Amino acid sequence: MTNKLLAKVLNDKNLEIATEIKEKLEPNTEYEIIFSEEEIIFKKVIPSVKKTSSLLRKGSGKSILRHAGTWKGDDLQECLEIVYNNRSQIEI
């Protein structure tokens, strides 16, 4: 890491950013700025996967079953009761 001035706050409180930083910024990308008394952290916001399509259709459980394999054991009823007793509504 080099120690050189990369950004400067001007008298009118505008920010002057060095070309090295501007070249690394991606167009149409959001950045989160976290700051304290001693430092400012500039982080790229990673967009989350869109969940709208999965929220609009009723879930079938098929995606879970692809990974679950077959049931082995004799405690299915007990496991179902545990699930039913611990279910709660969620806010989305």
Image (cartoon, rainbow, N blue to C red):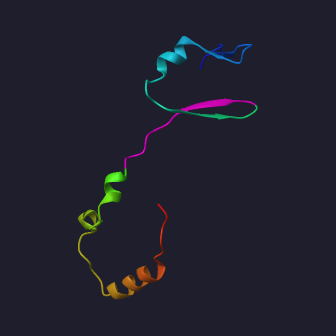
In this rendering, the count of numbered labels is: 0
Please check the rendered image and state whether residue 48 is part of the magenta-colored stretch, yes or no: yes
Q: In terms of depth relative to the viewer, which is nearer, 92 or 60?
A: 92
Relative to 14, does residue 86 appear above or below in the rendering? below
Indicate whether 91 appears above or below 1.
below
User: Height in image: 52 above or below 19?
Assistant: below
- Find residue 41 and report its horizontal and vertical position in percent: 62, 31
Instruction: Please name the residue shown 49% across and 64% down the image.
Output: 91
**Which secondary structure class fits the magenta region best?**
loop
Residue at the (71%, 18%) spot, across then down: 13
Is 32 situated left or right of 64 in this image?
right
Q: Which residues are magenta?
A: 38-50
Residue 10 is one of the magenta-drawn residues = no
Who is closer to the viewer here, 13 or 9? 13
Residue 66 appears in which quarter of the rendering?
Answer: bottom left
On the rendered image, what quadrant is the N terminus found in? Answer: top right
Task: Give the image quarter of residue 48.
Answer: top left
Q: Position of residue 29 (x, y in %)?
A: 45, 30
Percent x, y of residue 83:
42, 79
Q: Is residue 23 left or right of residue 70?
A: right
Give the residue drawn at x 72%, y 15%. 12
- Residue drawn 48% across the image and 79% down it: 86
Image: 1 above or below 63: above
Q: Give the image location of residue 87, x and y in percent.
A: 45, 76
